[in-house]
Image (spheres, helix red, strand yellow):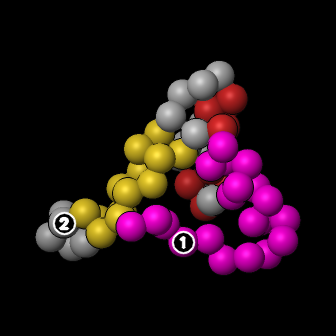
Amino acid sequence: KEMIKNDQISKELIDEGVKFDVYFLAYNNAILAQQIVDKEELALLENAADSKEKVTAKL
């Protein structure tokens, strides 16, 4: 959600069908979680922002 707000992930590109693979890394670059952000995930994130729910990455 913050990455979209900071324009690190382009909402316009997602609307055009681009999918982003987002990785959450530890200090040693081990992958802690991965999330694919596409139109469906963007809608979920936006709905969560409206309802003030906490969104967590799927492991």
Q: Residue at x 84, y 71 (%)?
A: 51
Q: Which residues are magenta?
A: 40-59
| Amino acid at circle 2 | Ala
Determine whether, in the image, residue 31 is placed left or right of residue 51: left
Determine whether, in the image, residue 16 is placed left or right of residue 43: left
Q: Quadrant of the N terminus?
A: bottom right
Q: Main secondary structure of the magenta part?
A: helix
Picture coordinates of residue 7, whole percent (x, y): 60, 45
Q: Label 2 belongs to which residue?
A: 30
**Whether residue 52 is situated above or below residue 35 in the rendered picture:** below
Residue 56: quarter of image: bottom right
**Gap in angstroms between the C-alphas marked 2 and 1:** 18 Å
**Whether residue 31 is situated above or below residue 22 in the rendered picture:** below
Q: Nearer the viewer, residue 8 or 24?
A: 24
Q: In the image, which disc is placed on residue 56?
A: 1
Q: Is residue 16 magenta?
A: no
Q: In the image, which disc is placed on residue 17?
A: none
